[in-house]
């Protein structure tokens, strides 16, 4: 089963999980060639041979050729994990610059839309596929100082629900995952001093691990979730208590 992952802490953990599940081929996508090579270096030689890479800006439709590349490599696309995302330093709505808003929305919302559009088209000939969109706990609730990031994560969760309505009758399942506070490089935006507060806000009193989100993604990609489409899977240690 060929699949696509957009890298980052969660993407890398998911890639490892798919490789451990003996996936046939994996296309890793990132805007940085250096990050892609660094990711490959953490895999065994055998796993590296099952991976292909593509450098792309996911917010550019001209560069969103990863679905077409998967078709060229393997003749089909079975799974797509759309998890590209950025977050900029916090600011109130009153102080958020339009440039920051546009940058976050271009990657987090536009990038996911483009990936969804092209991956779904690549899956249509087989009338079969699973698309997983990574939203956030902040796609379930508000968070002061993160208006652009939160809006982008609400947007992609809504997009996943609409896509499920449109694509499930065509054989393509679409689900979303909402991670809570996870120990990835994205945490650096908030500062290490924010970690204890995040931990205390969860029912489990700890940060999540990228592998715990990867497990949820792999479940939604698998036939084990064959009756799931339009599902929002919250994996947040009980953080989004009212979501």
Image (cartoon, rainbow, N blue to C red):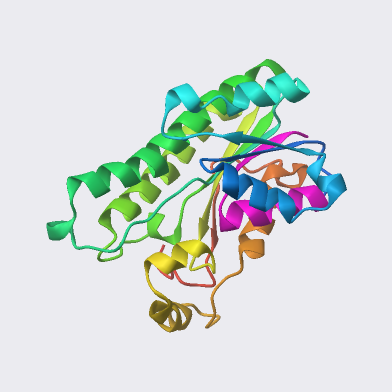
- Does 15 lie within the magenta span? yes
Most foreground residue, 76 or 167:
76
Q: Is 236 situated left or right of 111 in this image?
A: right
- Residue at the location (49% across, 45% down)? 84
Is 6 magenta? The answer is yes
User: Residue sitting at 51 percent across and 31 percent down?
Assistant: 116
Q: Is the magenta stretch mostly helix, strand or loop?
A: helix
Q: In this orientation, which residue lies closer to the viewer: 53 or 167? A: 53
Please indicate whether residue 226 sits to the left or right of residue 207 in the image: right
Residue drawn at point x = 64 percent, y = 53 percent:
12
Horizontal and vertical percent position of residue 147? 26, 56
User: Where is residue 136 drawn, in percent x and y?
Assistant: 45, 56
Report if residue 217 is visible in the image. no
Which quadrant of the figure has residue 221? top right
What's drawn in magenta, residue-wise?
A: 1-20
Q: Can residue 118 be seen in this view?
A: yes
Which residue is the extreme one toward the front? 34
Q: Where is residue 51 in the image (x, y as percent from the top left)?
A: 75, 39
Q: In this view, does 162 lie above or below 188?
A: above
């Amino acid at each position: 089963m060929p699949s696509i992952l957009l890298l980052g802490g969660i993407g890398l953990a998911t890639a490892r999980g798919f490789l451990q599940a003996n996936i046939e081929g994996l296309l890793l996508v990132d805007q940085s060639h250096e990050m892609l090579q660094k990711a490959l270096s953490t895999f065994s030689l055998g796993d590296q041979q099952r991976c292909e890479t593509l450098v792309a800006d996911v917010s550019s439709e001209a560069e969103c050729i990863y679905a077409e590349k998967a078709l060229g490599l393997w003749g089909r696309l079975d799974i797509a994990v759309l998890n590209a995302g950025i977050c900029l330093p916090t600011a109130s709505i009153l102080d958020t610059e339009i440039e920051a808003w546009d940058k976050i929305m271009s990657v987090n919302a536009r990038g996911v839309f483009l990936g969804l559009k092209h991956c779904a088209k690549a899956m249509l000939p087989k009338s079969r596929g699973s698309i997983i969109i990574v939203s956030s706990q902040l796609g379930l609730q508000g968070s002061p100082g993160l208006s652009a990031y939160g809006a982008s994560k609400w947007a992609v969760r809504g997009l996943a629900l609409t896509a499920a309505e449109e694509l499930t009758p065509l054989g393509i399942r679409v689900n979303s995952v909402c991670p809570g506070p996870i120990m990835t490089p994205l945490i650096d935006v908030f500062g290490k001093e924010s970690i204890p507060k995040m931990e205390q806000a969860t029912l489990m009193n700890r940060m999540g691990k990228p592998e715990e989100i990867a497990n949820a993604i792999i479940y939604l990609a698998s036939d084990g979730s064959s009756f799931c489409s339009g599902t929002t899977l919250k994996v947040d240690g009980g953080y989004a208590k009212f979501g």
